[in-house]
Amino acid sequence: MFTCNIADDCLKYSIASMKQVIQNFKTGELYVDEVPAPALTKGMVLIENKFSLISAGTERSTVKVAKANLLGKARQRPDLVAQVIQNVRKEGLKATLEKVRTKLDTLKALGYSTCGRVIASMDTNHFFKPGDRVACAGQDYASHAEVICVPQNLVVKIPDTVPYEEASFTTLGAIAMQGLRQADPKLGETVCVIGLGLLGQITCQLLKANGCKVLGIDISESLVQLARNLGADDAVQRSDANLMAMANQFTNGYGFDSVIITAATSSNDPIELSAEITRKKGKVVAVGAIKLDVPRDPHFYRKELDLRLSCSYGPGRYDTEYEEKGIDYPYAYVRWTEQRNMEAFLQLVAQGGINIKPLITHTFDITEAETAYDIVTGKRQEPHIGILLHYPDNDSKFIHTKIIQHNGAAQQQIEAGFIGAGSFAQSYLIPNVKNFGGGLKVVVTSKGITAQNVAQKFSFDSASSNSKDVIDNKEINTVFIATPHNSHAPYVIEALKAGKNVFVEKPLAMHEEELENVKACYMQQGGRLMVGFNRRFSPVASALKQNFKGINEPLVMNYRVNAGFIPKDHWTQDEQTGGGRIIGEVCHFIDLMQYFTEALPQTVFAQCIHSANSVNKNDDNIVINIQFTDGSVGSIVYVATGDKALPKERLEVYGGGKIGIINDFRGGEWYSNNKMVKLKMEGKGHTQEVHAFLNAIKEGHPSPISFESMYATTKATLKILDSLHTGLPQQI
């Protein structure tokens, strides 16, 4: 059953497995499959789709990228190629190839403009209720699927007079609306629209509703005629020899006040043409994905043209605070947001200012999506512009289980369930469980398509979007938790209470109250708990630990971390979700120091730089001093402002006349008796860590890391923040 728990209250509903359009990014294969429905969480709205729009230009490009071979993909994303090269230098070829394979071997959700009926809502404004007719936006949210879960700021109510078919165009309408806002056309101005596809046709109509005189340009004769039919003052083919004369006559020789480019092309022609036909001090607005090799002279320079880029649906796009957390911009200061652009477009449709019906050329059932995409990609030659997918009413969806069954192996001694299965889990956790011989029972992710992909890729018995399908499953004895940091402690408590062996990625908790709740549960329930502190299991750390055996004196440890820059809007930096880099990463380094000292951290003192640069987070650059119960001391220098050419991590351990060095877990050095020995060992211990935990289960041994140690590491990490806030050392 699909069950959603809201705090202490319980909102329950059941949804069957749903159909969704999927593309395998590695192979390019596009198909419709049954996947688990998405999970409803805070700030989201669960919706039963009625219609979704295939945006021919955007989705054609997306599909073609996926269908390209590896070289073709690389040519189209040189930015990602540069990241891969940098990662090879940092982590080595083998680790990088594994990451690339994981990224490529994914199932991609298509679509971003849909409409339907609200099933349930957890929006923080309590604005949406079951049964509401709504339009939705957002890549990876408003997908071609029977059921979708969309952030509240990307959902708007549909006026009663607007049919679902027309409401499915809302996202495209908002994109066109934002293009107009960037052009800021005044009543009576002349505007040219280059590119008369779906977006261009809507843009022309919006301009006419705004009281402008509009000329359209496109390479297609049929689209030129359609623009004329839908109200453009005139339209012309790009190849027409009289185009420049027509533009001159249309503007009385002055040139256009604004040119809006809605074409999608790798050619530089649209930007060059727009500069030529725009008046002096006019505006050129790029809405579509075009080449932007801006010719300075003669037109842009001599006319002092204003080139503006339009960002998709409007303010809020790519802002996680707005889109994912539902934090709206003040109405008085940001009048037109994504959501408000969507609402304005629907109002125009309701009032008859926009005519959508002529733009609908095809409607297919969701089961016929492959045929629809054959038209979009040109495999099936048919004139088209607006292609809709229809989702038939089927109330039976809301009475069945949503778990998707796969062929699984017979019962084994270790039967694992995964809650969370992002790139890290797919690269380091799941393969190592499988290689150990553990049974893979159920994988759970908030998006059903991801769970489906992982289940198929690693041969899980089933896929789900409900954590209860792991926690309450009697066949599962071991739970792996690899979710965002703020959910770790609650899931650990649930799993321990259910009598499971629990492996949770770091951190164990984000706040002291959470940590104490975990401790109380562990002390009461018992069980086997392991936090993903992998570095102590690395081959080089294990070798150095052996060399320090027998040294009965405190150690001095110096840990330098060239962490690299991460933007403030990255989820790990969010205080509510990720907790920041100290909580999310520094715990690793404290644990490794514990491993060498075999003692607990006792006091911490931390200082950070205070940068005036707003892009820097102050606690990304920090020096931490730690004293351990055996008298050992350690310092951690964690820096985000360094150069990537320097390897990330270096640990130096001093004691008993000996020195051990770890060089980014790609080797090490051992100094003793005036001799130096090179240690050629690679790996951060991910495989050894998982296998040690599973061996402990199999053989009936305690967790490889004691709860006391994991608790102390987590508490020390939290006390670092207290030290930063108070400026004083903190007792652990």
Image (cartoon, rainbow, N blue to C red):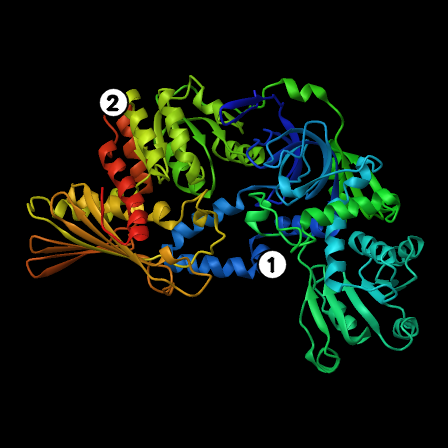
Vertical placement of residue 598 versus 656, above or below: above
Q: Secondary structure at mark 2?
A: loop
- Specify the farthest residue to the front: 332
Percent of width and height locating residue 692? 27, 34
Using the rendered view, name the quadrant where residue 678 is placed: bottom left
The one nearer the camera, 477 or 526, is 526
The residue singled out by tag 1 in the image is 76
* Nearer the observer, 161 or 459: 161
Residue 442 x %, y %: 47, 26
Identify residue type, mark 2: Gly
| Residue type at the position of mark 1 | Gln
Residue 466: x and y in percent read 52, 27
Report the quarter where the C terminus lies.
top left
Residue 624 occupies quadrant: bottom left
Check the image and report above or below for 394 versus 507: above
Q: Earlier in the sequence, mark 1 or mark 2?
A: 1
Whether residue 95 is visible, yes or no, is yes
**Which secondary structure, mark 1?**
helix
- Whole-percent x, y for residue 332 in the image: 66, 53
Q: Residue at x 40, y 25 (%)?
A: 494
Categorize mark 2 by other alpha carbons within 10 Å: few (<14), some (14-19), many (20+).
few
329, above or below 39, in the image: below
Label 1 crowd bin: few (<14), some (14–19), many (20+), radius 10 Å:
few
Query: Would you name the residue on which mark 2 appears?
Result: 700
Give the residue at x 76% y 27%. 392
| Relative to 451, 531 lies left or right | left
* 363 displayed left or right of 680: right
Give the alpha-carbon distance from disc 1 to disc 2, as whole Å.
Answer: 52 Å
Nearer the observer, 694 or 296: 296
Tell whether 645 sits left or right of 25.
left
